[in-house]
Image (cartoon, rainbow, N blue to C red):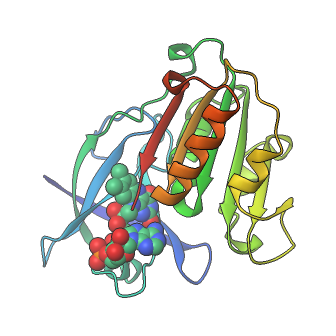
Amino acid sequence: MNRHQVLSVREITPETFVIRMEKKGLQFQTGQFITVGDIRTGERREYSVYSGEQDDYLEILVREVQGGKVSGRLKRLKPGDQLEVDGPFGFFKFHPGMFLPPDFLFIATGTGISPFHSFVKTHPGMDYRLVHGVRYANEAYDHADFDSQRVVLCTSRDEAGHFKGRVSDYLRTLQLKPATHCFLCGNSQMIGDVFDILTGKGIPVSNIYSEVYF
Ligand SMILES: Cc1cc2nc3c(=O)[nH]c(=O)nc-3n(C[C@H](O)[C@H](O)[C@H](O)COP(=O)(O)OP(=O)(O)OC[C@H]3O[C@@H](n4cnc5c(N)ncnc54)[C@H](O)[C@@H]3O)c2cc1C
């Protein structure tokens, strides 16, 4: 476990923010997560790395969960505060060369966009499509960092996205090539629903990779 100094806390919406912290030589493969904890309570939670492998800082994208023990504390951090960081952990690793053909479909709900932000930051110029499900269009976290031609924003509670409804509703409308590599990240309900839709469309189970947040 190491202590990393907070460099900045950038608010994206009233509930969601990006914490930038010192990297201190922590090497990770894009898609992995770290654990981040409060130095006073020692309580820790998992967060996907949001920054790219080459960046000289570490970032995480966090949504404050109502009544949550750690995410609310993270929101109150100020530059100069210290965090306990451990890792990297996990097998949701990504390098375009690991998956042939390099045809990628990334599917996220909410802050589940975080590893895909890191994928794209680390490997700019690759061929991908991103389907991001949120409630309201203002939760399109840092979509300017993605190629706008490759992103579909699905909004379940307003009409301001590209598609009104859940990611699962959108995916039901798509034709998919069976060789597509599908990466899923977010809540377990979405991952279960999307898994069934993808396999029903002929995507083999071996081409589906998932990271469950809660
Ligand atoms: C591998 C992994 C990677 C993760 N990466 C991220 C990430 O990049 N960004 C991020 O914001 N969170 C991420 N999480 C979730 C994170 O670890 C915490 O669970 C979350 O921040 C809540 O912690 P808390 O202490 O505030 O709430 P707690 O006191 O632990 O829990 C409160 C309740 O909220 C539920 N909950 C957890 N996350 C959410 C959520 N996003 N929305 C609604 N309810 C939720 C929990 O199931 C629990 O019932 C990840 C989880 C895992 C397992």
Q: Quadrant of ligand 1?
A: bottom left
Viewer-side residue, 40 vs 174: 174
Could you tell me if residue 92 is visible in this image? yes
Q: Is residue 55 left or right of residue 176?
A: left
Q: Residue placed at 53% from the left, 55% from the top?
A: 112
As drawn, which residue projects farthest toward the front? 200
Q: Residue placed at 23% from the left, 44% from the top?
A: 87
Q: Is residue 49 left or right of residue 116?
A: left
Q: How many marks?
A: 0
Rendering coords of residue 105 (x, y %): 67, 35
Locate the C terminus by quadrant: bottom left
Compared with residue 56, is residue 54 higher up or lower down, i.e. above or below? above
Rendering coords of residue 67 (x, y %): 35, 87
Rendering coords of residue 180 (x, y %): 67, 24
Compared with residue 150, is residue 70 higher up or lower down, i.e. above or below? below
Compared with residue 200, is residue 69 higher up or lower down, i.e. above or below? below
Could you tell me if residue 187 is visible in this image? no
Viewer-side residue, 155 vs 10: 155
Q: Residue placed at 39% from the left, 32% from the top?
A: 29
Compared with residue 143, is residue 126 higher up or lower down, i.e. above or below? above
Viewer-side residue, 153 vs 176: 176
Viewer-side residue, 105 vs 23: 105
Rendering coords of residue 81 (x, y %): 28, 74
As drawn, which residue projects farthest toward the bottom? 67
Picture quarter containing residue 190?
bottom right
Q: Is residue 195 left or right of residue 62?
A: right
